[in-house]
Image: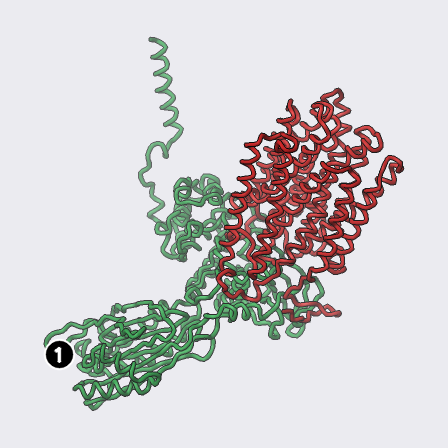
Chain colours: A green, B red
Amino acid sequence: MHFDGGLKLAIAQRSSAGQKSVNEDSLGICVPKDEQLTTKGAVAVIADGVSAAEAGKEAAETCVTGFLSDYFSTPDSWSVKRSAQQVLNALNRWLYGQGQSYLQAEKGYVSTLSIAVFKSQTAHLFHVGDSRIYRLRDGCLEQLTRDHAMPISRGKSYLTRAMGLDINLDVDYRAADVALADIFLLSTDGIHDVLNSNRLQAIISEAGDDLELACQRMIDEALAAGSDDNLSCQLLRIDALPLEDAGDVYRKLTALPFPPPLSVGMVVDGLVIEEEIHASPRSQLYKVYDATADRHYAMKTPSANYNDDPAYIERFILESWVGRRIQSENVIEVVDPPVPPSCLYYLSTFVPGVTLGQWMRAHPQPSTQQMLDIILPAAKGLQAMHRRDTIHQDIKPDNILVGDTGQVKIIDFGSCFVAGLAEIAVPITRDRVLGTAQYSAPEHVLGRRPGTRADQFSLAAVVFEMLTAHKPYQGRLESCTTTAAFTRLEYISASHYNPHVPLWLDAALNRALSISPELRYNDIAEFVHDLQHPNPAYSKDSFQPLLNRNPLMVWQGVSFLLLLGLIWSLAH
Amino acid sequence: MSSSTLNVLDLKQEKIRLLHLSWFAFFLSFVVWFNFAPMLSSIKEAFDLTSQQVKALMILNVALTIPARVIVGMLVDRFGPRIVYSALLVTGGIMCVAFAFANSYETIALLRFLMGFIGAGFVIGIRLVGEWFPARQVGLAEGVYGGWGNFGSSAAAMILPSLALYFGGPDGWRYAIAMTGVMASVYGVFFYWRARNTPKGSTYFKPKKSGGLVVSSKRDLVFYIAMCVPMYLALATLTWKLSPVNLGLLNGAAATALYVVLVVLFIFQVSQIIRVNSDVLNNVDIPEMQRYKFKQVAILNVAYFVTFGSELAVVSMLPLFFMETFDLSAVTAGMLAAGFAFMNLVARPGGGYLSDRFGRRKSLSILVSGLAVGYLVLSNIDSTWTIWVAVVATMCCSFFVQAGEGAVFAIVPLVKRSMTGQIAGMTGAYGNVGAVIFLTVLSFVSASQFFLVIAACAGLVFIAVQFMEEPQGHTAELNEDGSVALIEVS
């Protein structure tokens, strides 16, 4: 990837049982060598098993080994926060479950836990208990975490929060910025209870470049100062940050040249161009044939219009990156080219069929069942993307493929928002995608951060169009650019255009098409459920004013009164 | 299915329909813009004008187009091409009708000046066509758009004199011109009804901010600012021409005010240029990928100056020139003069084709030297020539002129893709600068000397073109057997 590499850390860690017979502290650092350093980051974990508990040592070890292995197994597209949260939840449940065999939970598998994840130019800190994370910058040591401990008597304290203590877990999360030469210190209470931050800072500064020495000295001094607990510390120094050099990123982006204009019969990396499926000012799509594997693929190539636009090239490269990371039978599958590519393109499986846009022209009045046969799988595909922390952002009829054999696939990841990638800083200005005006949710246009509910809106807009052959909001979404303009929009219900649309389905559409994302369904699954099952909340006739129930009578009444007024005024 | 060829008859395709809609819009804008040229003899008679006043009209007609291009470009950014194009046609049409029924020289001069706005229609269509056609077809599509649209001036020269004769009487010219205005207005409404900004359902990306070209070095920045000066000089020349010193259409105070406005505008533009180029001034390293040489832009500018500039100038003066030289009727002169712009239909797309096929610099050099020779020949035309020889000479010359325009615009997108819009805008503006300068020259010298001046300019441009570097791209190339091979270009 063009943003690979760059992050360099110097690391050191030490742990000692001290005056105790067993060491209940556990610690570990993992700096991946491959692409994961960019997508998942480098991780330092420190845990202090609670000595009052009977299995503190096991708990601490489980936390460290469990986190280090499970964190790196979460999808690349997930944000650090989401990945860590999932892993910590699972760990906590497991520890708590193990602890159930003891009479009191706090006697069981209990441990403090502090984690620092270094990704791109940010340190993501997760913390529970009384171990600590410090940052040393410009000669000033700052404690970044807050102890979750309640002092009960002099020198004694009681953990208020820890792993394995309760079935519900509150973990402090903080994203701290990282600068070159920052030193991060993770320590357990055996060290920071007896050495104050001035002392710690002095030790680190005196040791200079030798982090191992600094760790050893901290332990030695703490012991000398009378620490009676286990002593552990980790030091991480930032030696290089990624992407300081814009030129480097540009070079990587342009490592592969653009393919020339391709026409039928040409061969690229052993792939024969058979047909041009689509060409737009932004890209071209070809049907290609791989003779060695006897398979057909769809090949997407970038448009020469953008051969010096780094934002476009980045987006194009990320498209295949995203596609490769989503496995669902309802999302088009991106496949690796048979040989390493010689120019910029990517391949996906070739599914003979039409886009939903074409399908809609062929089926102007689909039945509700026909609609569901397409929308349900599409929603499944979207859910698969959402599970990967990926928002499609450009759901429209032309981006839903209806295969000849009935399978439905979501295509085109060109506008996707991927939480895990958004965390990686690059020195280029990224394009702001607005999606397709007729289908994209208002929050895109208003510049708010769109969530999964934006996809729900777009999918609902597609359903609306399928059932009614009209765009929602009379097609006026296109011309709205301000909050005021959006609130002025009038929602015309689907049953107005198509009397066959049942009331409850109409209400479900209405909710999913709410201008404000908070008013929509929490999840796309709820929306599609309400598309299939009459929601009792909607089927009952809620009270409606006379104007809505019988507008004709209202206006007839008004006219009659006016007529009376007219006669009266003429009479005088 | 699209390929590198373009089937303009395939009306089932939405984009082809759009292409026809937009070239016709451009065509009408050209008809309206140059509808006065074949009528000049009647106008001269009706208002009892001196030939100096007639030449001032010609200059006024092309002057406002220079700043108008910038304004129209900004409007398109803000409102989209569809509404801007129809608004331009409707207002242009209304002004044209007002021009047709005006009763004083001051009024027609003012209206002609305002109608310069309609000449900026080119920019809008280029943007629109760019939104609709994939990279491989867009060059050809824009060639068709530009070439067939430019043909509008030729159509005006051919049809309007006959139309005026058909209406008859001393006011025939008024009805003929008014009719083009009505047509443009009606078509403006039709265009709004039928045209769309983007293909249905295409993803919309927020357009990047434009303020000026981003250049790659301090030297280029100075060069760029220097290249902006001629645009203001052209407008200053016009002001001077109209000031009491010369024609006296403006009073002293108004002329001074205009000079001040021009200076303020220039300072504003320079400040904008410096703002977008702050990286260059602060010595921030510009990535290899984003670098380009400004001299390429400058050379294209001067090449367009001499090609499109001379075309606009010649189209304005040719009908009158033929009438006076060969003592012809307005209808015949119009017909014969139409030959000049007629070549647009094939020459402009042809120039692009030559450039694609035989190398950019070589084609442009040949075309520019061809037009130099062509204008040398035109400078020798006098009443002793047989008329048809003169017409053939103008048509040959115009082939080189318009093919040159096509060749220039074939190179524009290759200089720096991401700034094609701005480079095209600046190049187009230089075309209008050329028109203003050449027409100003014409107001001082005889037609034959006027042609000589253009020929001399073409000679200078020929030298400039030799400094142009063949544009290269970072693109894979094809082997003989059709498989793709890679050529690393840095």
Residue B104: image location, x then y, percent: 64, 23
Task: Work out whether B320 lies above or below A318.
Answer: above
Residue at x 61% of width, y 63% of height: A301
Q: Chain of mark 1?
A: A
Look at mark 1 in the image and give the residue it sits on.
Answer: A155
Instruction: Using the rendered image of the protein, determine whether residue A108 is visible from the camera's viewpoint.
Output: no
Q: Residue farthest to the left? A: A153
Instruction: Check the image and report above or below for A84 versus B176.
Output: below
Q: Nearer the viewer, residue B418 or A535?
A: B418
Front-lying residue, B239 or A491: B239
In which quadrant of the rendered view does residue B250 lie? top right
A188 versus A407 height, above or below: below
Q: Quadrant of the N terminus of chain B?
A: bottom right
Give the x, y percent position of residue B98.
Answer: 62, 26
Q: How many marks?
A: 1
**Farthest front residue?**
B245
* Between B451 and A403, the one nearer to me in the picture: B451
Residue A138, percent from left and from top: 31, 73
Q: Would you say residue A440 is visible in this rendering?
A: yes
Q: Quadrant of the C terminus of chain B?
A: bottom right
The amino acid type, in three-letter code, at marker 1 is Gly
Query: Looking at the image, which residue is at 64% across and 50% down?
Result: B427
Residue at left offset 41%, top offset 67%: A78
Q: Is residue A368 left or right of residue A154?
A: right
Horizontal side of B390 relative to A180 (left or right) equals right
Measuring from the top left, give residue B457's x and y in whole percent: 73, 49
Q: Secondary structure at mark 1?
A: loop
Residue at point 72% right, 70% down? B479
Q: Is residue A4 left or right of residue B190?
A: left
Near mark 1 (Cα within 10 A), the count class, few <14, some 14-19 or many ≥20, is few
